[in-house]
Image (spheres, grey):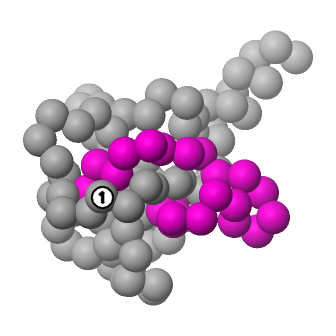
Amino acid sequence: MKKFKRHFRIYLRNNHPAYIVDEEGNMFVFHRVTHSKTSGGKKNWEKRTNPIKDNNTPMNIVKKEERDQKKRFSLFQIELKNGVDVSYPEIKLMSEILNKKKNKD
């Protein structure tokens, strides 16, 4: 089974980039991307450099994991700057967190 590769796409509901971390059937699991340091009164993950090509404004990723249908995202991935790693290991899938918690019990 091929491992899912994390990437960015345009979320068509707000026409902003989204960080896609996984797919479940016809759904993408994603985090919204923003320039703000907080979202909904909570701190976002801060990224010093923006990996999206032709965008030099600092980028933050919203911590809340969301799901939506694939048809609500652009067909193509957003082009990134050369040599940028977007694996962001600090962003764990909620399913991974729940599984670890379940295994401890």
Q: Quadrant of residue 84?
A: top left
Which residue is more in the foreground, 85 or 68? 85
Q: Is 23 left, or right, of 42 in this rendering?
A: left
The image quadrant where one finds the N terminus is: top left
Residue 25 visible here: no
Q: Is 21 left, or right, of 55 in this rendering?
A: right
The 10 Å Cα crowd at callout 1, few under 14, some 14 to 19, many 20 or more, is few
Which residue is more in the foreground, 9 or 40? 40
Residue 61 visible here: yes
Q: Residue at x 11, y 41 (%)?
A: 82
Give residue 60's position: percent from left, percent from top.
52, 54
Q: Quadrant of residue 86?
A: top left
Tell me if residue 82 comes above or below residue 66 in the rendering: above
Which residue is more in the foreground, 48 or 60? 48
Furthest residue toward left: 82
Q: Which residue is mark 1?
A: 56
Tell me if residue 86 comes above or below residue 74 in the rendering: above
33 in magenta: yes
Give residue 45's position: percent from left, percent from top.
59, 45
Q: Quadrant of residue 71?
A: bottom left
Secondary structure of the residue carrying numbered label 1: loop
Furthest residue toward top: 104
- Magenta segment boundaries in residue numbering: 31-52
Q: Residue at x 37, y 34 (%)?
A: 87
Which amino acid type corresponds to the residue marked 1 in the rendered image? Asn
Tell me if residue 94 comes above or below residue 74 in the rendering: above
Q: How many marks?
A: 1
Furthest residue toward right: 105
Q: Is 42 left, or right, of 28 in this rendering?
A: right
